[in-house]
Amino acid sequence: MSVDYERARLIPSAVFASPRAVRVCADLTREQKVDVLLRWAYDAAELAVAREEGMPGGEEDLQGQILGALASLQADLDPEQAGPTKQHGLPSA
């Protein structure tokens, strides 16, 4: 069974159980994995903002897992750069 890449790009957590599952997926190219993980990072940042504003939910270490998976794929990211929103996107270096 192959991975539905378009669905994974929209809702990574609906297709993959963890960021590690994205990293080891044989059905995706490296670029596709990075794309899915970046989307997941944005979603995790939104959850972190929601928690900060008093809303429940979200896994505490999810952002760390995503960043670890991206690092293992040697994604060209600059974590010192913060995005323009409260979610702080992960821009490419």
Image: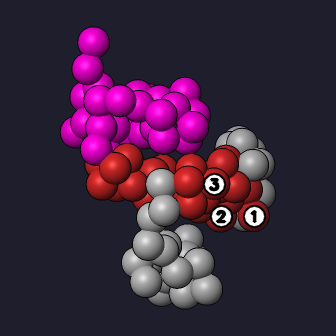
Q: Disc 2 marks which amino acid?
A: Val
Q: Which mark is residue 52?
A: 1
Q: CA distance from mark 2 to mark 3?
A: 20 Å
Q: Is residue 21 magenta?
A: yes
Residue sitting nearer the eye, 73 or 2: 73
**Quadrant housing the C terminus:** bottom left
Q: CA distance from mark 1 to mark 2?
A: 5 Å
Find out whether the residues at labels 1 and 2 contact each other: C-beta distance under 8 Å: yes
Q: Disc 3 marks which amino acid?
A: Gly
Q: Which comes before the other along the chain, label 2 or label 3?
A: 2
Q: What residue do we see at 48% from left, 54% from top?
A: 73
Residue indicated by mark 3: 68
Percent of width and height locating residue 27: 29, 30
Residue indicated by mark 2: 49
Percent of width and height locating residue 78: 52, 81
Circle 2 crowding by C-alpha within 10 Å: few under 14, some 14–19, many from 20: some
Percent of width and height locating residue 25: 41, 31
Q: Is residue 85 visible?
A: no
The relative height of residue 48 versus residue 86 in the rendered view (above or below) is above
SS for dot 2: helix
Q: Which comes before the other along the chain, label 3 or label 1?
A: 1
Q: CA distance from mark 3 to mark 1?
A: 23 Å
Q: What residue do we see at 72% from left, 42% from top?
A: 59
Q: Which mark is residue 35?
A: none
Circle 1 crowding by C-alpha within 10 Å: few under 14, some 14–19, many from 20: few
Quarter of the image where one finds residue 29:
top left
Which residues are the magenta region? 1-29
Mark 2 against mark 3, which lies toward the viewer?
A: 3
The relative height of residue 51 versus residue 11 in the rendered view (above or below) is below
SS for dot 1: helix
